[in-house]
Image (cartoon, grey):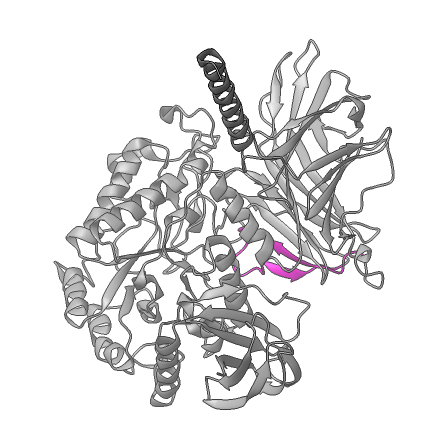
Amino acid sequence: MSARLLLSFFLLILIAVAALSCSRGRIENAPAVSSVHIAAAAGGPLVIRTPAAEFHFFPTGYLQASLLQNGQAFSLDDPPSATNISADSLLSGGKEIRDFVMDLDHARIGEASGRLGATGKRIEVSGKSASLPAIERTMVIEVYDDFPTIALTSTSYKNTGRTDLPLEQVITQQHFLNASLSDRNAAPYSMWSFHGSSEAWGKDDVMLLNAKFSRANPMQTMQHNDENQTGGGIPVVAFWTGSVGEAIGHAETVPLKMSLPVRTLTDGRVSAAVAFEGGAPLHPGEVLSTPLTFVSVFKGDFYEPLSLYSRMLQKHGLSLAHPNASDYEANWCGWGYEMDFTPKQMLGTIPKLKELGLKWATLDAGWFKSRGDWEPRTDTFPGDSLQKVVRAYHDAGIHITLWWIPLVVEDGHGKDILNHRPYQLSKVVKDHPDWLILDKNGKPARATADLGALCPAVPEVQQYYKQLTERFIRNWDFDGHKLDFSYTVPACYNPKHHHKSPNDSIQAVGDVYKIIFETTRALKPDSVTQACPCGTPPSLAWLPYIDQAVTADPVGSRQVRLRTKMYKALLGPEAAVYGDHVELTEVVLSNTLHEVDKGRDFASEVGVGAVLGTKFTWPDYGPKFKIVELTSEKQAHWQKWINLYNAKMLSRGKFLNLYTYGYDTPEGYAIDKDNRMYYAFYAPDKQKQWSGQIELRGLKPGRYAVVDYERGRQLGVIDSQNPTLKVSFDEHLLLETNLQL
């Protein structure tokens, strides 16, 4: 072969190798192909299909969601048959507009924007109203491979006319739910539900719907329903039967003022929607866009959509705090001594705490002169006596946290609901009256407990709370916080704050809680920061900025268990959730309507993986404290459960959602810890013994010895292929499984 031919041969080889390398590069760098498929049929709905769900988008704008399992579709969604009534609507000039028709034939289909992952599909559809042709409605739907059971939606309205258009309210994500679709023998409303609104102290979050059900579910709105104003909430409502569930809500990472109204209709179906309040009139050419909302389908109970919601927000940029070892320690709280407690009472309890093995405590309400200033009372804590209490606890090897309320202030108006005295005018308000939140009339707005509030969107207010936190943690040496009455704040109309929107105050609540948490962690890495939305679900505003959740003044054992499950879903299966004072597992009202807390149900804390808590008093301080006094008889019971909690520490285990609330009997919970499975079962009626067969779900292959770890009883051996056991128990049954070699 000549030199020229040899050179040509090698050039051809190099070209081929280079071409192959380029080809491989194109294959390796090629974008992943989405498993989301969209099909369109003339006159029919657009069908969005993932491996786990199917969404049908109708010309009325209705988005019907179904769960796919074993080749079958399961759904609660029952769209109206009428084609001239749109699913979503708006209120304009007092008139409801719901005759939008979406032009599916000209839908624009493309790749998703990347909000929830690299791959997915996006649909954009526009439509018109016959009764209000000057408004154009556009809806965008996105479905992602990483979240195949969720459809994200956003809606915009454009004023194409020549005059201003009032918009008082926008209703989106409207769904009509029918339990009969999954169970032909069930009434349409016969389903369980979760409601994330902070609506009223003690109101159930999880409930069975009925034929007369109606709930407004306002979010991030002060609820002045009694002396204890509430407000905040998690913007999710969920519904489920034994075979399928559906949830809706807003998908933004900031708290928004809106509502999720739910009601049973006259035909028995359940209406649920997302409602946003309108603002200023829409000028010609302007566009009003709703926040991002979602619909999801699932199998199980409320744990599933709340966990999915949390993961969705984290993917969208929300970061959650991580608990430390201190967050899981059992806690004694001084609230048993109520508002007028003394240093003597706090110091006198120390020997009993050491005897019981309790290493964390809380100095509760009543230590301060006025809310807002947060300085010690001179009548009960003169001089440095508060700091002396802290030192005494530390000398005894016990950490101690401080009770207080961020953002509220005594502004000289209203009356204290705890000791019924008129509110003072705090020094911070005297010195900085411009920091107050004002209402539409220019008056100091009312926050929880009829208090005033400092605006969290003001930089000087944020700095003030940083300085307060440094005083409590660095100067006074407390080990963390019990942040109480943690709701939201009113909208702020103070002209001196120069807000872009009155709702700026609501969206800035989390900024103050973030400052408190991060300042505390920087000063004491092993600190505890707890926020208590008394009697209600938490607020999205501050949820990322706590390392210990709390079941928040539960009314009875059921709420302890269900709120623990709620927080494990929102914050992660290993989250630290304080079960609150065990005394709250049985709450009754006396003849004088005074609350009497006499619960002893530690099993409803220990068994579900909550952190144990109590507020007993000791020694005998007279009849006022008899209900919560730690008598010798009670001490044996308390000691037993504190020892059991410290030995098992199930609060540090991994919560597994293996049982569906409302459909699995008895009520069941499972925790994976140290390569062992732990189970807790609770009788439907605490007054009656329960007998029957239970199933121990989630076991790995093998044979297991089953132990009643509360009583140290062997109950038998089961095989993971048939993990059932016949049992009889009163109130509760706590089990541990040990793999047999």
Image point 36% across, 39% down: which residue?
511
**Who is closer to the viewer here, 256 or 321?**
321
Which of these two is toward me, 390 or 710?
A: 710
Residue at 45% across, 89% down: 712
Q: Is residue 76 left or right of residue 380?
A: right
Q: Is 673 left or right of 387, judged from the image as shown?
A: right
Query: Residue extending furthest left?
Result: 383
Q: Is residue 192 magenta?
A: yes
- On screen, residue 228 versus residue 659, left or right, reads left
Q: Which residues are magenta?
A: 188-210
x, y (%) of residue 503? 47, 33
Can you name the residue that lies furthest to the front here?
1
Residue 56 placement (x, y as % from top left) = 76, 39
Q: Is residue 504 magenta?
A: no
Look at 17% across and 67% down and name the residue there: 394
Majority secondary structure in the magenta region: loop
- In the drawing, does residue 360 fall left or right of residue 292? left
| Residue 96 seen anywhere in this rendered image of the structure | yes
Residue 715 found in image quarter? bottom right
Residue 546 in the image: x percent, y percent? 37, 52
Question: From the viewer's perspective, is residue 83 above or below residue 734?
Answer: above
Kindly indicate the quadrant of the structure image that contains residue 402. Answer: bottom left
- Asked if residue 554 shows in the view, the reply is no
Looking at the picture, tell me which residue is in the foreground, 119 or 583.
Answer: 119
Residue visible at 53% across and 76% down in the picture: 680
Image coords of residue 189 (percent x, y): 77, 57
